[in-house]
């Protein structure tokens, strides 16, 4: 199974970084929270859907019809259409962001050369920090995952868990059967043997021939170095999947989206 965006995903989950940060600040450590946020965090719908329920008078707090702007906490009795809602009392879920990295950005907070950083695009978090799950080099685009949960990041990145990384690779020309055998059988690099676990021909001609590859480690520039060892230049490299998370087809370069609580829980169930 893969964690992908649902087909009916609301556009509000995909925002320009400059205008979206205010919507995703870390929740303050208080006993109560806005009703729509509290119910959304408990997987009862999107905030917009819950706001519509509140506006329609279908939600109550302690037997009083709720209104937009009301706050509630675990001690309150909340009902939707008369049905009692049981709220989670466990620790808040981590935040997870999917980002479509363009070429020309580094995956580092600081760069002596002053190049653009992927972290410049992310929303601010008050009491924690964004952890990049895996890296992409300056000239590689595609899927990056960020989280505030160090344990989740470790579970996805640590070599012993053999998490798959899938890439779309464009080269000049076409691989020979012998080259395919070497790439999937193993090529000795300066930091050890490397191989692709899967390699698929995606077609194309001349300078625009594409392949899909899957490998289970993330050494520095590993994909490019493997092709270079055969005298082949990679003209385009894009990560399209990391573990169970796919790059959403409609997420444009330089844009990010934040997983809702039900998606965070599903990802945790898949990898933990």
Image (tube, rainbow, N blue to C red):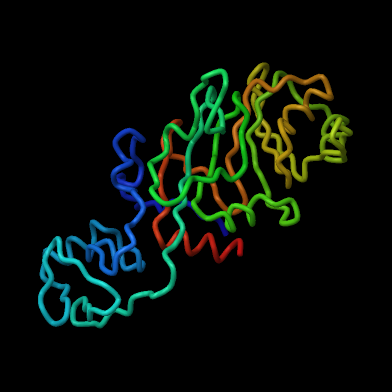
- Assign the N terminus to one quadrant of the image: bottom right
Residue 236 location (% of width, % of height):
62, 24
Using residue 64 as the reference point, say whether residue 243 is left or right of it: right
Residue 270 location (% of width, % of height):
58, 63
Taking the spot 56% from the left edge, 28% from the top edge, the residue there is 106
Relative depth, front residue between 58 and 134? 134
The answer to which quarter of the image holds residue 124 is top left
Q: Is residue 14 above or below residue 270?
A: above
Residue 101 location (% of width, % of height):
51, 33
Taking the spot 29% from the left edge, 47% from the top edge, the residue there is 23
Residue 251 location (% of width, % of height):
43, 38
Q: Is residue 142 above or below residue 209?
A: below
The answer to which quarter of the image holds residue 169 is top right
Q: Is residue 136 above or below residue 8?
A: above
Relative depth, front residue between 227 and 256? 256
Taking the spot 75% from the left edge, 44% from the top edge, the residue there is 198
Using residue 184 as the reference point, say whether residue 215 is left or right of it: left
- Assign the C terminus to one quadrant of the image: bottom right
Taking the spot 29% from the left edge, 46% from the top edge, the residue there is 12
The answer to which quarter of the image holds residue 85 is bottom left
Tag count in the figure?
Answer: 0
Relative depth, front residue between 116 and 251? 116
């Amino acid at each position: 199974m893969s964690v992908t965006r649902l087909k009916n995903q609301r556009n509000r989950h995909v925002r320009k970084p400059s205008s979206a940060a205010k919507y995703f600040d870390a929740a303050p450590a208080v006993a109560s929270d806005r009703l729509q946020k509290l119910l959304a965090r408990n997987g009862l719908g999107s905030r917009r859907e819950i706001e519509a329920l509140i506006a329609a008078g279908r939600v109550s707090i302690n037997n009083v019809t709720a209104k937009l702007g009301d706050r509630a906490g675990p001690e309150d009795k909340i009902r939707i259409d008369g049905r009692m809602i049981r709220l989670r009392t466990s620790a808040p879920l981590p935040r997870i962001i999917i980002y479509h990295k363009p070429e020309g950005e580094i995956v580092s907070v600081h760069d002596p050369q002053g190049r653009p950083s992927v972290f410049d695009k992310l929303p601010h978090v008050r009491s924690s920090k964004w952890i990049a799950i895996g890296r992409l080099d300056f000239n590689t685009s595609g899927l990056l995952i960020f989280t505030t949960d160090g344990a989740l990041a470790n579970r996805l990145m640590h070599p012993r868990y053999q998490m798959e990384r899938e890439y779309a690779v464009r080269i000049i020309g076409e691989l020979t059967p012998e080259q395919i055998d070497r790439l999937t059988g193993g090529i000795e690099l300066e930091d050890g043997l490397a191989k692709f676990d899967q390699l698929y021909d995606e077609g194309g001609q001349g300078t625009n021939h594409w392949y899909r590859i899957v490998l289970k480690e993330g050494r520095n520039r590993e994909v490019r170095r493997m092709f270079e060892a055969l005298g082949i230049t990679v003209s385009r490299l894009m990560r399209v999947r990391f573990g169970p998370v796919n790059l959403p087809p409609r997420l444009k370069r330089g844009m990010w989206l934040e997983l809702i609580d039900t998606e965070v829980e599903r990802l945790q169930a898949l990898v933990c």
